[in-house]
Image (cartoon, helix red, strand yellow):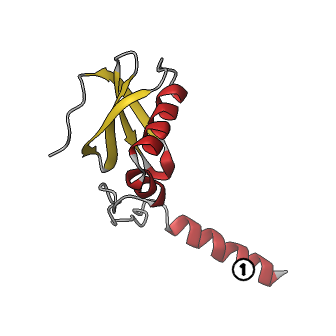
Amino acid sequence: MKLAALALTATCALTLSACGQDPVRNTTAAPTVPAGPDRIQSEIAAMNDGQRNGVLFRAISDAGQKCQGIDTSARQEDRDGQPTWVAKCVAGDSWLVAIGPGGNAKVTGPVAPAKTAG
């Protein structure tokens, strides 16, 4: 019984002695720039135009935008480290599609007609 009381007293003393002290902080900065394209981003970038236009169409469609099909697409400069294309739909609207990690697409627009990166 005395051993249990001593252990409880020691635990309480250690707990209270920690009050008011700064907690240990993690000073390691999280990376803000992606290390490079992931497998899916690389696969989409390597597709032929027809395959990639199918992916871009699906991204635009899934984003709730009207597009009957992709007429043309053009690679743009990466946005926040994400491969990006401007896709022009058959009806004329163009959409900016950035492919994020894991294939998650961010669709914005409509945008001005496509220009090639360079």
Q: Residue at x 44, y 41 (%)?
A: 50
The kind of residue on which mark 1 rests is Leu
Q: Position of residue 69 (x, y in %)?
A: 47, 25
Q: Is residue 35 left or right of residue 76?
A: right
Structural crowding at the residue carrying mark 1, measured as other residues with C-alpha within 10 Å and reported as few (<14), some (14–19) or many (≥20)? few
Q: Position of residue 5 (x, y in %)?
A: 76, 76
| Nearer the observer, 112 or 13 | 112
Quarter occupied by residue 72: top left
From this view, report whether residue 5 is shown above or below residue 30: below
Q: Residue at x 78, y 84 (%)?
A: 3
| Nearer the observer, 112 or 20 | 112
- Residue topped by disc 1: 6
Q: Is residue 61 left or right of residue 8?
A: left
Q: Position of residue 116 (x, y in %)?
A: 20, 39
From this view, report whether residue 67 is shown above or below residue 52: above
Q: Residue at x 55, y 65 (%)?
A: 16
Number of marks present in the image shown = 1
Q: Is residue 88 left or right of residue 5?
A: left
Q: Position of residue 115 (x, y in %)?
A: 20, 33
Quarter occupied by residue 90: top left
Q: Residue at x 49, y 34 (%)?
A: 59
Q: Secondary structure at mark 1?
A: helix
From this view, report whether residue 88 is shown above or below residue 97: above
